[in-house]
Image (cartoon, rainbow, N blue to C red):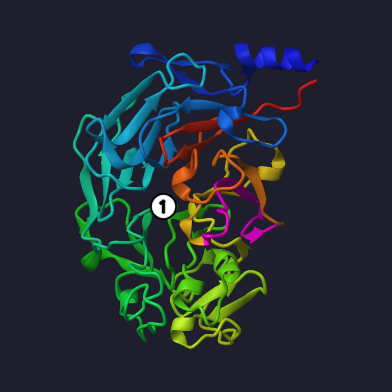
Amino acid sequence: MSKFDNMRLLKIGIVVLLGMTLTGCGGETSTSSSQTLNFSEDNGGITLPDNFQAVVVADSVGQARHVTVAENGDIYIALEEEKNGGSIAALRDEDGDGTADQVEYFGSYAGTGIQLHDGYLYSSSDTSVVRYTMEENQLVPRGEAEIVVEGFPDQDSHAAKSFTFDGSGNLYVNVGGPSNACQEEGRTPESPGMDPCPQLENHGGVWQFDANTTGQSFEEDGERYTTGIRNSVALDWNENAGKLYIVQHGRDQLNTLWPDYYTVEDNAELPAEEMFAVDEGDNFGWPYTYYDGLTGQKMIAPEYGGDGETAYEGDEYEDPIITFPAHWAPNDLIFYSGTQYPDHYSSGAFIAFHGSWNRAPEPQQGYNVTFVPFDGAEVDGEYEVFADGFAGQDSLSSPGNAEARPTGLASGADGSLYVTDSQKGKVWRIVYTGDEE
């Protein structure tokens, strides 16, 4: 087939067998064995592996954070700030072309986390987790939100309360550390760290709650599941492993806070972003240590006596299972359970990297969706960049200049991967289309 023919097919849409349930006009449902998806000629500005294509579902829903997709294809996106009077954007594709024909807004709990679970839509603000009862074929819930957990500590930084569920009725909520490195004087050159760090009492870990009980409070009902985590916006329960996994935002400002020990180049390349397999009671070492991905060592943080060369030699803190370059800023994690993609992707992890300011004055990095192969509970190979080009330019000096910043991930019932953007609220649906002759 010629390049011209391929382009013509892209313009008129390619019939992709997805075997999914479509939602038609007026809330009625119909079952179809195919959809005609209107793929974007340039995949909506991103690059993908061969035989993958993307539909731009929507291009401006608001400052999108995490995303979840219903069995019928309806999409729900948590917003960092309210838009059109709502903190959640609800999207419906009525004609099966992959783009949203109906966009509604509801809710008053702007934040990051969102997930459909056991007939409810759960979402989170920076201080609470709520849920809405979802009725069949209703895009927007009729009832008000119920409080699941409230009273999370107010904090000026790392406040996102992302969350996930296991298969045993438990809810896991990220409570990030409210500082960079628990210094006596925050982000002040050569200020020592508080030892022990008092912030770890109510921050810097993941807390566990009952997913099925409303009216809980952080202080009275939460149980600290793991500690020593600076901020794990990206977390997911891996059903194949029966275990929680997180990807941590590493610390900032090694050079600006400790110029005697670290160069500008060190500041851009350290520390690694770390992925952890979590068992209850684990401690991952923040703020006392960080991980040097260049040498493969856990290092003593300079606030606690480190000098950039002294490795941590104890066994109190757990090591990562895989690392990524510094300051990529992992913002979502999902384990792929669909069957649409090739076997290579089965049960592996997709991670959305949001990009960060802290590589400055060196060029920014991240702004991609990365894939990590898994075999059961174990990483089974090196990470690979799956979707790239979100930033819209090769050299980026500031996150604000990025065209898009990947923030949320979800898998649809048909196995498509959905990606959200926090800049303007663009939404991609990535589909495996198979070999083209």
Q: Position of residue 433 (x, y in %)?
A: 67, 26
Span of residues in magenta: 359-380
Q: Is residue 81 above or below residue 142?
A: below
Tell me if 28 is positioned left or right of 426 in this view. Answer: left
Q: Position of residue 141 (x, y in %)?
A: 26, 31
Mark 1 is surrounded, within 10 Å at the Cα level, by few (under 14), some (14 to 19) or many (20 or more) other residues, namely many
- Is 376 magenta? The answer is yes
Residue 107: in sight, yes or no? yes
Residue under the point 70% across and 57% down: 380
Q: Is residue 150 above or below residue 179?
A: above
Q: Is residue 239 above or below residue 217?
A: above
Q: Nearer the viewer, residue 263 or 24?
A: 263
Q: Secondary structure at mark 1?
A: strand
Tell me if 219 is positioned left or right of 137 in this view. Answer: left
Residue 348: in sight, yes or no? no
Q: Nearer the viewer, residue 28 or 55?
A: 55
Tell me if 434 is positioned left or right of 281 in this view. Answer: right
Q: Which residue is mark 1?
A: 165
Residue under the point 72% across and 17% down: 6
